[in-house]
Amino acid sequence: MRKLSKTTYNNLITYGIIILAYILVQILLATGSLSSLMEGLLVPLCTYVILAVSLNLTVGILGELSLGHAGFMCVGAFASAFFSVNMQGVIPSDGLRFFLALVVGAAAAGIFGLLIGIPVLRLRGDYLAIVTLAFGEIIKNVINALYVGRDAAGFHFSMKDTASLNMAEDGQVILKGPQGITGTPGDSTFTVGVILVLITVFIVLNLTHSRAGRAIMAIRDNRIAAESVGINITKYKMMAFSISAALAGVAGVLYAHNLSSLTATSKNFGYNQSIMILVFVVLGGMGNIRGSIIAAVILTLLPELIRGVGDYRMLIYSIVLIVMMIFNWSPKIRAWREAHPLFRRGKRGEEA
Amino acid sequence: MKKAVSMFLALALMAASLTACGSADGGAGDSSSEGVAGETFFIGGIGPETGNNSQYGLAVRNGAQIAVDEINEAGGINGYKIAYDFQDDEGTAEKAVNAYNALKDWGMQILMGAVTTEPTVAVAAETVEDGMLQITPSGSSLDCVQYDNAFQVCFTDPNQGIESAKYIGDAGLAQKVAVIYNSSDSYSSGIAEAFIAEAENQPFEIVSSEAFTNDTSTDFTVQLQKSREAGADMVFLPIYYQEASLILQQADDMGYDPLFCGGDGMDGILGVDNFDTSLAEGLILLTPFIADAEDELTQNFVSEYQERFDEIPNQFAADAYDAIYIIKAAIEQADVTPDMSTEEIGTALIAAMTEITVDGLTGEGMTWEAGGTVNKTPRAVKIVDGAYQAM
């Protein structure tokens, strides 16, 4: 048998952790020892892991700050929910419909990523952050102003209200502006979520370790040097950015099909959410996929597990977040950890 | 090393979550009362305790707490005490489902919630699967009661719009009406849409309909200017009182003085900080609850609420108080006991909901349709000398 390279070994550990977690949860589910709260959190956990891993592609590997990741998630969520609600009676098989919804969501978000990328990726650094931030807000507001209905004559659109859709009596309003889309089928399951997480991790890890990935990282590390050896900067930037957007769209599909009501509020698709995903990436380590997964899981679980403390929940959550950030990244504490025997053991296996 | 720390944190967390699984009924929050499974009714509440809508969630939590304490002091429902726990949903659908699952772990049998519309719709999809009775004190869109197991204490948005239009038409209050509403809020746009549709059957016309969003809810001069240019003698504001107070202020600044009229979200306008309440003189609002009403029930509730929480209760608190008494009435009607399964209790209570009649703070002789909507008469009040006066 061929000897495994260090990267392959490292990647296998990442896949192993995900599969182990999946098996552990399945055992707990089968024995009925998982609380309803944990059971309900399984799909959101997958959603946030996918978001964190996909944003890591833009932030950690491409080295560009994107603050509009929730916007791509929003595109994927609404495109797929719209598709599923329309197709509910047409495609009888739930599995096929959900698969197509995933394709629709990923494609819609990917196309938006491409469209945003064309003008923006010629810019550098802060400009990209600002434009992506604006994009996320625009998407949210456009969806809040959009009314779409369907009757025998086809689709009706309006930017004003449901009355101006002029629909026939039997018409059904699908997207109701700020009230969003209701009645999305609950197709998301933990198994599908884990498969999507594995696919996402597979795509990102393989891209990183491919020829294209090395070009992308070369752009991150030294743009001028990369350009001078003939790397097509715009092409590789676009590639990373639109793949990242499409994967965020997949997370959006998972999110939309987990809840029966989907609305675009600043809480779920606003810049707060984008920053939250960025926090997962930063806490887990830029460019570190396994770190993103662990950080996303911990930070999603934390506020739910401390429900017991009541009124102080959000306060404690923020404090824990600050402490974790300092513990992981403060230079002084890192130096202290290097010296401390308890933490020294893991040093050998440390990743780049 | 990073790995070691991450591993450590992950392990600690896993240990914490596993222990949380083991002690399901020990994980209740601070607002819960002690309960023994089989001998106590477990009523859960969901609403925003943090975030933008926290004032509504806290009002619901407190209002329901008063009702629970009153019932427990008086000996409970058919001799069974109530255990009550309220969980935070931050006003989002996603967290509301988490809160619902946390309450299920606690042992919840009946749900009073959620407070805002989107969380209510999301939770309703879960309760219908579990066959649980859900009574929302203030989730007002029609989607909140799309399933048979969900019932409302408040009016639905379309009903409120229709009732308002009828009231204005019947009383002949205006000929030309302008509407200013929040298009990013489902409550506001729901009322506005129904109001505009119903206006066609009424003796007044809609001369302008202008929207704003949560992101532009500070400057209303453009909308007011358009209303004035259209010659409106009444401005209908189906919005919450914070924005309404700004509109009244800005209308006064530009010397525009039409009649203003609002829905139940307007309740609370007299309590806004730094707001000159003389600007609200003559404001008409349709609200199910008036804090300074003369009847004994309201007065007791208001004084109790003020004593315990140091503020005047708004209609959300009153809706929640009523919701608990509605649950009590349904339990008495269906004659269920706490040792039955959640689904058995749910089925019996859902059938009982259409048979009961409840006199509460927010209306007398409230009855429910099988569809989940409430039948009660709206009350119109006018602000005179800084206080509500029934019309």
Image (tube, coloured by chain):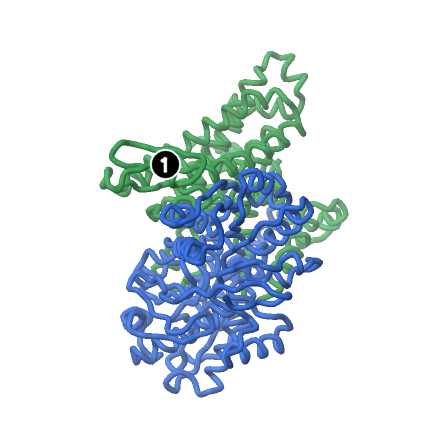
Chain colours: A green, B blue
Q: Residue furthest right?
A: A332
Q: From this view, report whether residue A32 is shown above or below residue B209.
A: below
- For the residue pair B312 and A92, the one nearer the viewer reads as B312
Task: Inspect this view and state whether residue B118 appears.
Answer: yes
Residue A190 in the image, given as x and y percentages of width and height: 38, 49
Q: Is residue B371 left or right of A297 when viewed as pictured?
A: left
Q: Residue at x 35, y 58 (%)?
A: B145
The residue tagged 1 is A165
- For the residue pair A171 and A117, the one nearer the viewer reads as A171
Secondary structure under the numbered disc 1 in the rendered image: helix
Q: Residues within 10 Å of mark 1 (few under 14, many from 20)?
A: some
Question: Which chain does the numbered disc 1 sit on?
Answer: A
Q: Residue at x 51, y 45 (%)?
A: B178
Residue A11 in the image, given as x and y percentages of width and height: 50, 37
- For the residue pair B18 and A6, the one nearer the viewer reads as B18
- For the residue pair A168 and A10, the one nearer the viewer reads as A168
Residue B253 in the image, given as x and y percentages of width and height: 69, 47
Residue B213 in the image, given as x and y percentages of width and height: 55, 43
Task: Inspect this view and state whether residue B141 appears.
Answer: no
Q: From this view, report whether residue A291 is shown above or below residue A115.
A: below
**Callout 1, which amino acid?**
Leu
Q: From this view, report whether residue A248 is shown above or below residue B58.
A: above
Total numbered circles: 1
